[in-house]
């Protein structure tokens, strides 16, 4: 019975401009050594003036479509995760649909901050499993550089720009085995992006930049990701040793290492991109997946654990037989 969502294409895009830790230390009090030791990040990409979430999404999406060997109009649904949409509406999904020249599919955005790609995979999986759609494109695309306060050393060191894409198709071969998504809105004040245009009167002067209490976020992230690992393994009656690759959200190397340790996995089995990309929010997991698929690390038949944590808080995982 055909009831899996199988990965048939991946894609990724990173803007060409790099901003190194040394570049940042020219305008805030920090250092390459401090940033690398506390986060694992050395540099991040910065989108050009003419780039937007939809323009970057198009490049990543076209790569995924080419890898899958399909025509864009075969896609039944486009799901875009972004915290930096070109416009509030039309959705970046609709803008991407138009860029891809697709006339007849559904397209929409989801907002789950850094967990967006996992939420997107979960939504796509439900539609494919039920037979509603055959082919679904999931994209995470972010221009974080425009929503960080470049004078705040607690946040500006962490984030970067980029887009990742994955194309899923209904298949009899195993694909997504399970997804697990969660939210807990009580942590709003630890990590949020104000929307000055729609703010309450008392908050109307808040600048539209990421606000974060990094140390507190860090602790919740480590504990929460530990729990999602257990939940995912239990739901699939699987042992830690059966997982071939951890494909984590790229927020901080210390958070990633804690999850790998929990899984008793060596860092050789973890796809890490953050050293040169920073945290690209909803794009990061799909960028990491794309990189490891294209360089041949990830092979057909292997078991992948994708996971993410973000503002909300939101968190989730996807277990995939690639
Ligand atoms: N350079 C130098 N010093 C810095 C700094 C920087 N860029 N940022 C903060 N510091 C200082 C602080 O001011 C503080 O100094 P103090 O002790 O004199 O007050 C000290 O370093 C420790 O700050 P703290 O915030 O406790 O550091 P940390 O080890 O928690 O590292 C983060 C800060 C932001 C790197 C870390 O908390 C983090 O990565 N958190 C998770 C964030 C995240 O993943 N968010 C996205 C979730 S999707």
Image (spheres, rainbow, N blue to C red):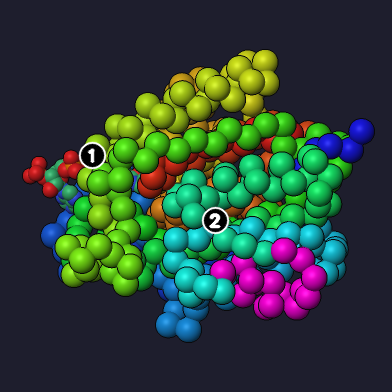
In the displayed orientation, state which residue is furthest to the left: 29
The kind of secondary structure element at disc 2 is strand
**Picture residue at 57% right of the left edge, 69% below the top:** 92
Q: Position of residue 172 (x, y in %)?
A: 89, 37
Cβ at disc 1 under 8 Å from ligand 1: yes
Mark 2 nearby-residue class (10 Å; few <14, some 14–19, many ≥20): some
Which residues, given as a range, are shown in magenta?
A: 91-106
Which x, y percent locates residue 96?
64, 72
At 62% from the left edge and 62% from the top edge, which residue is drawn?
Answer: 108
Residue at 56% across / 50% down in the picture? 117
Between 22 and 281, the one lying in front of the other is: 281
Does the segment drawn in magenta span residue 97? yes
Does residue 24 appear in the picture of this structure? Answer: no
Residue, disc 2: 110
Mark sitting earlier along the chain (2/1): 2
Instruction: Look at the image and tell me in which quarter the C terminus lies.
Output: top right
Whether 234 is drawn above or below 304: the answer is: above
Instruction: Provide residue 254's location: percent of width, then percent of height.
Output: 35, 36
Q: Is residue 307 above or below residue 284?
A: above
- Mark 2 vs ligand 1: CB below 8 Å: no
Please tell me which residue is depicted at 80% across the width and 70% down the height of the picture.
Answer: 104
278 relative to 20, above or below:
above
Question: Can you tell which mark lies on residue 215?
Answer: 1
192 falls in the magenta region: no
């Amino acid at each position: 019975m055909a009831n899996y969502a199988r990965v048939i294409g991946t894609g990724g895009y990173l803007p060409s401009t790099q901003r190194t830790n040394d570049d940042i230390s020219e305008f805030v009090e920090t250092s390459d050594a401090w940033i690398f030791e506390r986060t694992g990040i050395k540099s991040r990409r910065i989108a050009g003036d003419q780039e937007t979430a939809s323009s970057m999404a198009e490049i990543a999406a076209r790569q995924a479509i080419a890898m899958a060997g399909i025509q864009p109009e075969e896609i039944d649904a486009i799901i875009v995760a972004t915290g930096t949409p070109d416009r509030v509406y039309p959705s970046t999904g609709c803008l991407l649909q138009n860029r891809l020249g697709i006339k007849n599919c559904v397209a929409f955005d989801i907002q789950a901050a850094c967990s967006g790609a996992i939420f997107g995979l979960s939504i796509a999986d439900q539609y494919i499993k039920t037979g509603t759609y055959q082919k679904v494109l999931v994209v995470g695309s972010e221009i974080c550089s425009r929503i960080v306060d470049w004078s705040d050393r607690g946040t500006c060191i962490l984030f970067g720009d980029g887009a990742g894409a994955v194309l899923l198709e209904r298949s009899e071969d195993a694909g997504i085995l399970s997804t697990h998504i969660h939210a807990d809105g009580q942590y709003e004040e630890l990590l949020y992006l104000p929307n000055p245009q729609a703010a309450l009167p008392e908050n109307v002067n808040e600048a539209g930049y990421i606000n974060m209490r990094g140390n507190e976020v860090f602790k919740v992230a480590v504990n929460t990701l530990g729990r999602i690992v257990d939940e995912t393994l239990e739901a699939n009656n699987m042992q830690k040793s059966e997982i071939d690759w951890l494909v984590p959200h790229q927020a901080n190397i210390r958070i990633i290492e804690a999850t790998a340790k929990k899984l008793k996995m060596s860092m050789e089995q973890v796809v890490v991109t953050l050293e040169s990309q920073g945290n690209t929010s909803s794009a990061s997991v799909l960028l990491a997946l794309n990189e490891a698929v294209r360089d041949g690390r990830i092979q057909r038949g292997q078991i992948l654990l994708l996971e993410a944590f973000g503002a909300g808080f939101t968190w989730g995982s996807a277990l995939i037989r690639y």
